[in-house]
DNA sequence: CCGCTGCATCGGCGACTGTCAATATAGATG
DNA sequence: CATCTATATTGACAGTCGCCGATGCAGCGG
């Protein structure tokens, strides 16, 4: 969070599973930013906690409890998730509520789909035994 | 690659979309390691390049060309992907071939599935207009 | 108007990451 | 064995990340 301030809300990068055709350099950069936001245990738990709460939203005060980190750190992680376009928030009086943006999750998840060709490249292409 | 040497090949962490119930601390840690391996443009392109080649595998010599980084850097990224359980490799004579492990990709992708409840928590829970 | 509470921002610190040049290793070939 | 090619490892450096304490700011209640 020192130089990479730009909102990572790029268009969409792409949609087809990346196992179909090589990613462009630009798409890879945009998508990597999305995965980077997911690449932290606290953020992952925050995301799942917000999504699984009734109503699909959570007050920050509900999110600081379950974690061993300080409130500024939670606020920081929420900011990262928000700048990655994975969540959004709104102030309601004293409290601020966060919710997940499912489309962003879906977009990243769809990219990881290896397709129905599970048997072809299952473990090893044409190899005989196991490897390293 | 200085202290985090342990192979991130944890069991499986979990399977259900993380939007259903809060992730445990251990699951979040394991899964974050997986996403961390995806959180780099070069690794993302490597992965998609390997997967999209005929036969689903690629020689390292096929992978160093399309990138602006040095050969040791490619080798480093391949190692990260391999230690994250996303790819595997085998030496065949002079060359080393890599291929994607689709189950690992599927596991991470399935986690991001926000479920069929696309309408319920589509954009905002019960809000009126847009926000920040 | 004043203090209180909920949340965000700032500044700094230690740890980790991506990168390269240099070097090491493995297999092929002469 | 000498040597060449393909790939991995090492060591170093700059940049980034996650974390905290301190501080700022916005609503609410007296």
Image: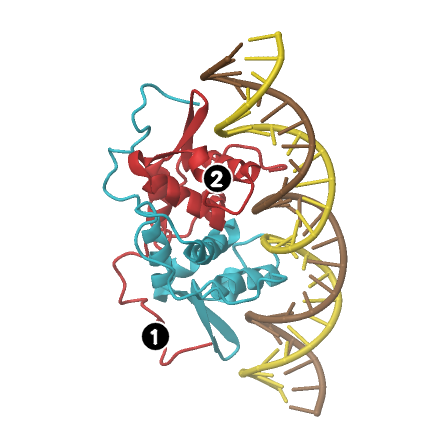
Chain colours: A cyan, B red, C brown, D yellow
Q: Pointer 1: residues within 10 angstroms few (<14), some, or many (20+)?
A: few
- Nearer to the camera, B65 or A122: B65
**Left of B16 or right of it: where is A50?**
right
Image position, residue A86 (x, y; %): 43, 62
**Left of B54 or right of it: where is A8?**
right
Above or below, D10 relative to B14? above
The structure residue drawn at horizontal position 44% and vertical position 66%, both measured from the top left corner, is A9
The structure residue drawn at horizontal position 35% and vertical position 66%, both measured from the top left corner, is A55
Disc number for residue B74: none
- Nearer to the camera, B56 or B110: B56
The structure residue drawn at horizontal position 36% and vertical position 77%, both measured from the top left corner, is B127
Q: Which residue is mark 2?
A: B64
Q: Can see residue B39? A: no
Q: Can see residue B41? A: yes
Quadrant of the image containing the N terminus of chain B: top right
Image position, residue B98 (x, y; %): 40, 32
Q: Which residue is mark 1?
A: B126
Of all chains, the one bearing label 1 is B
């Amino acid at each position: 969070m020192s130089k990479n301030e730009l909102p990572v809300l790029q268009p969409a990068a792409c949609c087809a599973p990346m196992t179909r055709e090589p990613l462009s350099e630009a798409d890879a950069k945009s998508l990597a930013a999305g995965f980077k936001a997911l690449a932290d245990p606290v953020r992952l738990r925050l995301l799942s906690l917000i999504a699984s709460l009734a109503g699909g939203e959570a007050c920050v005060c509900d999110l600081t409890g379950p974690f061993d980190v300080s409130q500024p750190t939670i606020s920081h992680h929420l900011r990262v998730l928000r700048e990655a376009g994975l969540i959004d928030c709104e102030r309601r009086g004293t409290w601020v509520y966060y919710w997940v943006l499912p489309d962003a999750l879906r977009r990243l998840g769809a990219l990881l789909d290896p397709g129905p060709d599970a048997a072809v490249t299952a473990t090893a292409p044409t190899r005989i035994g196991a490897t390293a």
